[in-house]
Amino acid sequence: MKKLIKKFLYEALILKVDKPNNKLIVQSNEPDAKKASQETFRNKEALKANGFKWVNNFWTTDINNFETAKETLSKINKSSEFVGKLEELQDFVENSEDFQGKSNLMDKINMYISDLANATDDRAVSAELKKYFDFFARFRGHSFYNTMLIWIQNPNATKVAGFRQWQDKFNRRVVKGAKSIMIFAPMFSKKDKTDDIEDDGSIDKSALSTIPVRFRPVNVFDIADTEPMNEKGEVPKTPEWFTESEPTERTKELFSYVKEAAEDMGIKITMGDAKAGEKGYSAGDHINMSSSVDGAGELSTLIHEFAHELMHWKKTSLFYQGDDVKFDSAIKELQAESVAYTVMKHYDLPVQHQPTYIALWKGNKEKILANIRVISEVAKFIIDAIDKVAERKQIDENLYL
């Protein structure tokens, strides 16, 4: 029985008092750092639901929330009584070497983000990206029904236009034998006439009535079924947003650290084929990495998806950004890629592709700087997590020397 009690107390979560900040801190009695981290994060939902917040690498709550905290840990520890004891934390000396190090880290992080913001704006106005944006901006959007019709008839279609549109507007011709796609085009009447006019995207909208008088079936063709008539009809090459690279000992090492840091938080990491050409994806406590990416690109992708896990899942993210961000793909990608840039920059690894990627998501300097706080916080969290794993690995290696 004594052994059983000892084991139970040994694994329990306990509260400590942070008097200078009037906070209660949750810690694990488990001496193994990795197991202690897993013990804490395994119960993150219960802690969040009862007023605890993740601050400076600890779950904390206001000191006045003692009774609720005690009851919460009692339930977590599956005990009717509060397990553990309150301990005094040593006074935190603000001018200590550790504090100065953290302050300098945040200064560097903010500098990296500012550099990224400037680079993204420069990339967005580059001739390559402007040509790409200008070309594809000429394609009009389609209604839900027409989008579904296009998909049903040609699931691989990307950009469609009518036979004459391809010639007159894009300097491209439909290739012989190409199969058309049927959609419904709105028919409008001129404000000063009663004749019906098909809106093919080239008509001055001010000359038309605002409400279509009817719809009629028309044929369109996918861009893959066209060819250029002259130089103006050349399709701009999609900008290379990702730089492939050969793995190095450094990228392999850091990849293993990031992977372990994510797994410490209960995030499952899998290696599987891409579903739609993606380098990886975040699925809420699950990250899948594609086998098509390697080296610094693989590391950057894992950090990017780790950032999504930390920010964009309502039920599990420590830095959840709210429902407004949840449904804004562009902002989510800007945040995650900015975090990846910052962490990669911190470890002096290649970061050339990030500004282009963010620009392709309509990101710019203003948007990046508007998100600087959360980017900084999440980047620091990941850097600290990587360094902790690295330190743990070093200690383990020294034990066997």
Image: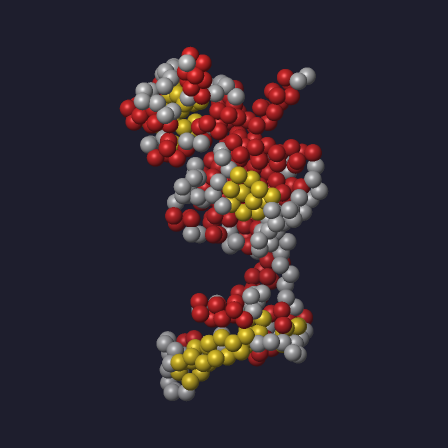
Asked whether residue 163 appears in the rendered view, the answer is: yes
Residue at horizontal 43 percent and vertical 36 percent from the top: 318
Could you tell me residue 286's position as x and y percent?
51, 42
Quarter-wise, where is residue 89 in the image? top left
Q: Please state if 115 lies on the left or on the right of 319 as rendered.
A: right
Asked whether residue 22 appears in the rendered view, the answer is: no
Q: Quadrant of the C terminus?
A: top right
Relative vertical location of residue 211 with respect to residue 243 in this rendering, above or below: below
Residue at horizontal 40 percent and vertical 41 percent from the top: 315
Could you tell me residue 8's position as x and y percent?
42, 19
Q: Please state if 192 lies on the left or on the right of 262 as rendered.
A: left
The one of 187 and 282 positioned closer to us in this rendering: 282
Could you tell me residue 214's position as x and y percent?
40, 80
The one of 338 and 316 positioned closer to us in this rendering: 316
Residue at horizontal 69 percent and vertical 40 percent from the top: 247
Q: Quadrant of the N terminus?
A: top left
The one of 357 and 267 positioned closer to us in this rendering: 267
The outermost residue toward the front is 1
Residue at horizontal 65 percent and vertical 68 percent from the top: 234
Relative vertical location of residue 160 with respect to residue 111 in this rendering, above or below: below
Could you tell me residue 283's position as x and y percent?
49, 45
Figure label count: 0
Quarter-wise, where is residue 193 in the image? bottom left
Quarter-wise, where is residue 133 in the image? bottom right
Looking at the picture, the colour scheme in use is secondary structure
Relative vertical location of residue 226 with respect to residue 249 in this rendering, above or below: below
